[in-house]
Amino acid sequence: MKQYKIVFDRKACIGAYSCAAVAEDIWNFDNKENKVDIKLAGMKGDKEKQEVIIDESMLQKALDSAEVCPVQVIKIIDLETGEEVKRS
C-alpha cells in the first residue's frame, strides 16, 4: 500500500481548527496553546513541527485537512516521489 507523510508546521498554526473539523481522527485540540496536534500513532515531532506516515486509507482525510487550513501549514508528501500531493 502506498504511503504518505503529513508534515505539519505547528509553530505557524493559528488555531482555526478547520483541519480537526474535517478530520477529527487525525487532529487533537490543544486548548492550552489554541493549536492542534497530530494524534496518530507514530507521530514524530515537537511543539514546532510534527510528522506522521499514513497510508492510502487516510489520504483523503489528510488532503481535506490540508485544503481547509487557512494558513496552509499542513503538507501531504508522497513518499515514493517526494512530491507534495494536492487535489487536482
Image (cartoon, rainbow, N blue to C red):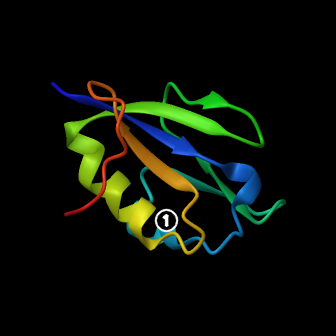
Q: Is residue 20 above or below residue 70?
A: above
Which quadrant, please, contains the N terminus?
top left
Q: Residue furthest right?
A: 32
- Give the residue displayed 77% in from the left and 66% down from the top: 34
Q: Horizontally, is 16 left or right of 40 in the view?
A: right
Residue type, mark 1 in image: Cys
Q: In the image, residue 53 lies at what x, y percent? A: 41, 29
The count of marks equals: 1
Q: Position of residue 27 (x, y in %)?
A: 52, 53
Q: Residue at x 69, y 51 (%)?
A: 10
For disc 1, the marked residue is: 19
Q: Secondary structure at mark 1?
A: helix
Does 80 sit left or right of 13 as displayed?
left
In the image, 29 versus 35, the foreground residue is 35
**Front-most of residues 6 and 31:** 6
Residue 49 location, quadrant: top right
Of 59 and 28, nearer the camera is 59
Q: Position of residue 83 (x, y in %)?
A: 34, 38
Count residues near mark 1 (Cα–Cα under 10 Å), then give few for <14, some for 14-19, many for 20+: many
**Residue at 52% across, 41% down:** 7
Residue at image position (82%, 60%) is 33
Image quarter hosting the C terminus: bottom left
